[in-house]
Image: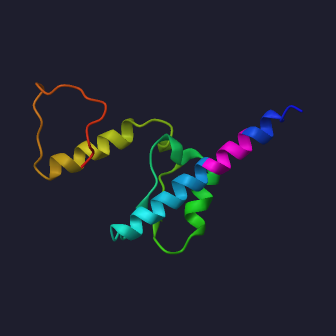
């Protein structure tokens, strides 16, 4: 019997939110985080937002929806903080999609 598309989508969403939420909290505990920032396009998801906002272990920061649809603002913020720390990269570096963020 076919599964209704809405049911499959809801189940997929629940599974993804569970993994993101659980792994984020585990990492926050493991690394002694003081707060959690949920950012990027995925932070526009209402179920994910509610999951993070419902927990009380860590303060959670989530940008307004108007800033959650494009990663440009997130990349600009990351660049700003790297620049503020004195980190500079020349234009001669190669583009690698797997560069670490730290």
Residue 51 locus on image (x, y percent): 60, 60
Q: Main secondary structure of the magenta part?
A: helix
Residue at 47% over, 52% down: 63
Q: Residue furthest front?
A: 1
* 68 sits to left or right of 18: left
Can residue 35 be seen from the camera position used here?
no
Start and end of the magenta stretch?
A: 9-15
Can you say which quadrant of the picture contains the N terminus? Answer: top right
Q: Is 68 above or below relative to 32?
A: above
Viewer-proximal residue among 82 and 96: 96
x 45%, y 43%: residue: 40
Task: Check if residue 13 falls in the magenta segment.
Answer: yes
Question: Count of labels shown?
Answer: 0
The picture places residue 102, in percent across and down from the top left corner, at: 24, 49
What colour scheme was applied to this rendering of the protein?
rainbow
Left or right, 83 with respect to 25, comes to: left
Picture quarter containing residue 70? top left
Residue 55 sits inside the magenta stretch: no
């Amino acid at each position: 019997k076919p599964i209704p598309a809405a049911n499959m989508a809801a189940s997929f969403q629940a599974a993804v939110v569970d993994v993101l939420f659980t792994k984020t909290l585990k990492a926050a505990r493991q690394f002694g985080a003081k707060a959690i920032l949920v950012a990027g396009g995925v932070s526009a998801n209402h179920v994910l937002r509610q999951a993070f906002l419902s927990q009380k272990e860590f303060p959670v920061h989530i940008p307004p929806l108007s800033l959650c649809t494009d990663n440009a603002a997130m990349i600009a913020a990351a660049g700003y903080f790297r620049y503020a720390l004195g980190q500079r990269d020349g234009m001669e570096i190669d583009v690698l999609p797997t560069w670490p963020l730290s």
